[in-house]
Amino acid sequence: MCTQNCIKRPIFSLVMAAILLTLIAACGGSDPEELEIPIKLENGSLTPATIQVKQGDMVTLKIDTEEAGEFHLHGYDIEMDVPAGVPTDLFVLADITGRFKITFHAAAEDEHEDGDDEHDDDDEEEIEIGILEVNPR
């Protein structure tokens, strides 16, 4: 003879399984995306200051800057020279999660006061301008 508990347990188990599957599907890993993110460097500030993407995304940072120099994405160790006033694309496969500094090195003057065409790397100032935040998928 079966009591009411014999019927309630399987129904409860099915309801809980359905809820669990719904939660997994809602949180679950979407496919990586190809993203184009316009960023602007003006007066030493990056807009947006924090760029958020998900792991696996193919990201194109569309850089617009008023000053020539070098962008450096720390952690990924990507460096790129960017001219002033000419939009430039920086490609990143966001395969490492975390928060990564974006720095800018202003272009050195072509010629120092002593007439030497070479520049000393110590003369270049590195400024932190933003963050790339790569979240788990």
Image: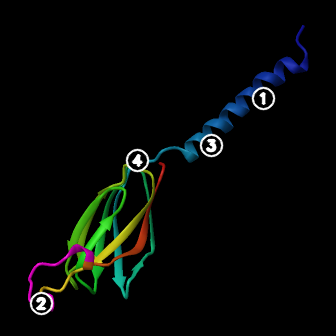
Q: Earlier in the sequence, mark 4 or mark 1?
A: 1
Which residue is labeled 2 in the image? Answer: 114
Q: Earlier in the sequence, mark 2 or mark 4?
A: 4
Frontmost of labels 2 and 4 is 2
Q: Earlier in the sequence, mark 2 or mark 1?
A: 1
Q: Earlier in the sequence, mark 3 or mark 4?
A: 3
Residue 108 is situated, as x and y percent measured from the top left of the image, at 20, 82
Left or right placement of residue 57 versus residue 6 in this view: left
Magenta stretch: dominant SS? loop
Disc 3 residue type (three-letter): Leu
How far is mark 2 from mark 1, CA to CA? 83 Å
How far is mark 2 from mark 4, CA to CA? 56 Å
Q: Can you say whether 88 is above or below 135 in the image? A: below
How far is mark 3 from mark 1, CA to CA? 17 Å
Which residue is labeled 1 in the image? Answer: 12
Q: Residues within 10 Å of mark 4 (few under 14, many from 20)?
A: few
Residue 11 is situated, as x and y percent measured from the top left of the image, at 77, 27
Q: Residues within 10 Å of mark 1 (few under 14, many from 20)?
A: few
Frontmost of labels 4 and 1 is 4
Given residues 36 and 81, the one toward you in this image is: 81
Q: What residue do we see at 32% from left, 78% from top?
A: 125
Which residue is labeled 3 in the image? Answer: 23
Q: Which residues are magenta?
A: 112-122
Residue 12 is situated, as x and y percent measured from the top left of the image, at 78, 29
Frontmost of labels 2 and 1 is 2
**How many numbered circles does the render carry?**
4
- Kindly indicate the quadrant of the structure image that contains residue 53: bottom left
Which type of secondary structure does the marked residue at label 1 adopt? helix
Which residue is labeled 4 in the image? Answer: 31
